Image: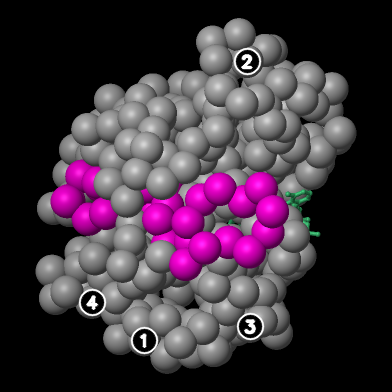
Amino acid sequence: MNEKHKTNGTSRREFLQTSAGLAASTLLFGLGGARSLAAPGASVAAGSIPSVTLNNGLRMPRLGFGTMTLKGDPGSVADAIALGYRLIDTAMIYNSEEAVGEGIRQSGIRREELFLTSKLWKTDMGYEQAKKGFQSSLDKLKTDYLDLYLIHRPSGGDWKGSWKAMEEMYHAGRIKAIGMSNATDEQMNELMANSKVKPAVHQIETHAFFQEDRAYDYLKQHGVQMEAWAPLAEGRHGLFTNGTLAAIGKKYGKTNAQVSLRWHYQRGIVAIPRSQQHGHRMENLNIFDFELDGSDIASIATLNLHQTLFPEWS
Ligand SMILES: NC(=O)c1ccc[n+]([C@@H]2O[C@H](COP(=O)([O-])OP(=O)(O)OC[C@H]3O[C@@H](n4cnc5c(N)ncnc54)[C@H](OP(=O)(O)O)[C@@H]3O)[C@@H](O)[C@H]2O)c1
């Protein structure tokens, strides 16, 4: 690692708070539960991932853990929590909610130290069904509230009825923030103009190859937090071997995954990388001790293909 990017102790904390260009809205999440990473070179204290303040005042960790294929794998979730992840992203359709609930139980962490996200699937659209879908997620997760609940794919059915139900559950304190995923411009405009509770988060596909600059500007302008699904593009289009990312990583002693996640972080995007490997989970956390410079950002901008890498989900 380049010496000038090494930080430690209190000075590292200051560095974390100032390095992302979002210092005013950045706080450290869950400092009370800090534990040290065991691996050599790991340089972020577990439980001290910076957070962003959402448009309703809720604090959300700026790096989390995705669980899309982790059905039947509570151990990965428990390990992620032990490593320091506090934001866990799941969804009814992943069939991973039970594993997440069990992983949380195994971790022994207090519920209030976590930021738990789940999502309402298409089959549960509509006012009444949304309430049932939400309760079913709570039951599987073995919790009585969610930090964030998203409409997963509002591509059919009565999504406005779902939103109304989510607003009610939000006001009842059963969800701390509500948001959208994969919404169209029209749907976002509709919510921004007419909903009682504005979406706090929009979770969409974005990574170095699909930078979504227009959505990025829109969400920033409207105070909606952008969250990246597939922040590592699931490795598609050769992300883990890409020469541009590798050349940048070489400067800082970082991998392509770490450069990618640092890029999201510096843009102010919350990323939720998934991994079934302990080493990768640890690697993905270790992004807070270096900073991409202007030339790095300009190089990554050239990787943008301006189109989804997941056409099968469009
Ligand atoms: N809202 C939506 O519609 C939507 C859609 C898709 C995903 N999501 C959410 O977003 C999360 C993340 O997206 P994703 O799971 O699609 O993909 P991703 O996080 O971009 O990529 C996951 C893949 O990258 C590999 N990987 C992770 N870290 C690595 C590292 N450091 N080095 C090399 N390989 C690494 C993993 O393999 P290993 O397991 O071998 O490490 C896995 O194959 C999901 O889990 C889910 O929670 C939401």
Near-viewer residue (279 or 314): 279
Q: Position of residue 271 (x, y in %)?
A: 52, 46
Q: Position of residue 245 (x, y in %)?
A: 75, 25
User: Ligand 1 lies in which image quarter?
Assistant: bottom right
Front of the two marks 1 and 3: 3
Q: Is mark 1 within 8 Å of ligand 1?
A: no
Quick check: 56 left or right of 180?
left
In the image, is residue 76 above or below residue 60?
below
Query: Which residue type carries mark 1?
Result: Thr
Residue 174: mark: 4
**Render colour scheme:** one colour
Q: Amino acid at mark 4?
A: Arg
Query: Is ligand 1 within 8 Å of the beta carbon of the residue shown at mark 2?
Result: no
Sequence order check, earlier mark of 3 and 4: 3
Residue drawn at the location 37% of the way across and 37% of the way down: 11
Quarter occupied by residue 33: bottom left
Q: Which residue is mark 1?
A: 143
Can residue 95 be seen here?
A: no
Answer with mark 1 or mark 2, whichever residue precedes in sequence.
Answer: 1
Task: Report, in whole angstroms, how far the alpha carbon at label 1 lies from the one at label 4.
Answer: 10 Å
Label 2 sits on residue: 296
Of labels 1 and 4, earlier in sequence is: 1
Which SS type dominates the magenta stretch? loop
- Relative to 102, residue 122 above or below: above
**Tag 3: amino acid:** Pro
Stretch of the chain drawn in magenta: 35-62
| Rendering coords of residue 48 (x, y %) | 40, 55
Is residue 124 rendered to the left or right of residue 312? left
Q: Residue at x 73, y 56 (%)?
A: 280
Give yes or no for residue 55 being in the magenta stretch.
yes
